[in-house]
Amino acid sequence: MNKQEALLEYCLRLGDNSLIMGHRMSEWCGHGPILEQDIALINIALDHIGQARNWLTLAGEIEGKGRTEDDFAYKRDAHQFRNLLITEQPNGNWGDTIMRSFLFDTFNFYLHQVLQHSKHERIAAIAEKSLKEIQYHQKYSSEWVIRLGDGTEVSHQKMQNALDDLWMFTGEMFEADEVDQIMLAEGIGADLHQIKDVWTDHIREVLEEATLKMPELNWFQKGGKQGRHTEYMGYILAEMQFLPRAYPDAVW
């Protein structure tokens, strides 16, 4: 794999993470526990979609084949997506969604902190622009983890169950493959091992305040970054891609 191929893959991973997470969060529209939180999640979903647009537009420019952000979003099959497996997990209950966001948001925050200093000017600019939104996402989900984990007996148990169920997907965040290694060597990408250290520290700090126990699992599900997804991905795309595939020539 050469540098150009790795750069394209890297941008697709960043864009697909935001796109699929944004779609999952958008599914809460009209279903939030209270109106304020319903609106909050939809705003977060819009943040993710906006970030996805930036990354996928850049991916199209790097590829140089005329594909747009819409082409990447609506005209790829599941095996062509490069998002982390955790982003495609079902919303479940409120606790499941909050825990999924907390684990991903924390990773995303520290990743973008590094990427804003990337040697690739466009990547640095997109990361810097996205960071304020991502910082809010992390703050929002962290506060909810504490509120629910240290809340009632029921809310505590729901949060612990969500943490135990989702923990198997966290290891993939820090699994450095050839793409990650090339991007790091070029000064474009982030050192995932360093990010894991600060991620773990923040996760442990919040979980302790939330009176939740960090799982001791030492094996992890992975493959999303290489296009191997869970069964949920097909259902996401069936919903997300239906209109543009059914009416490919439609315009606003």
Image (cartoon, rainbow, N blue to C red):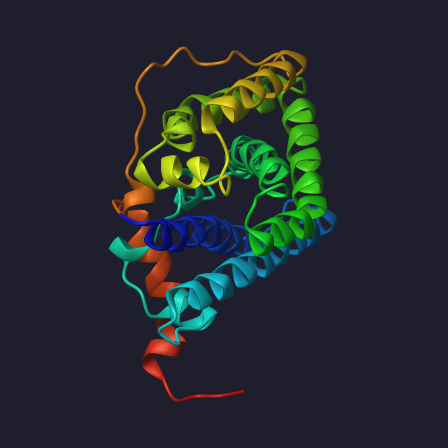
Q: Is residue 71 above or below residue 199?
A: below
In the image, 199 versus 88, the foreground residue is: 199
Q: In the rendered image, is residue 29 in sight?
A: no
Residue 141 pos. (x, y %):
64, 34
In the image, 19 versus 230, the foreground residue is: 19
Residue at 65%, 43% (x, y): give it.
134
Residue 236 falls in image quadrant: bottom left
How many numbered callouts?
0
**Can you say which quadrant of the picture contains the C terminus?**
bottom right
Residue 12 pos. (x, y %):
41, 54
Q: Is residue 183 left or right of residue 204?
A: left
In the image, 138 versus 3, the foreground residue is: 3
Q: Is residue 72 left or right of residue 42?
A: left
Residue 84 falls in image quadrant: top left
Residue 229 pos. (x, y %):
28, 45
Q: Is residue 208 above or below residue 75?
A: above
Residue 164 pos. (x, y %):
43, 21
Q: Is residue 92 left or right of residue 29?
A: left
In the image, 62 versus 98, the foreground residue is: 62
Q: In the rendered image, is residue 144 in sight?
A: yes
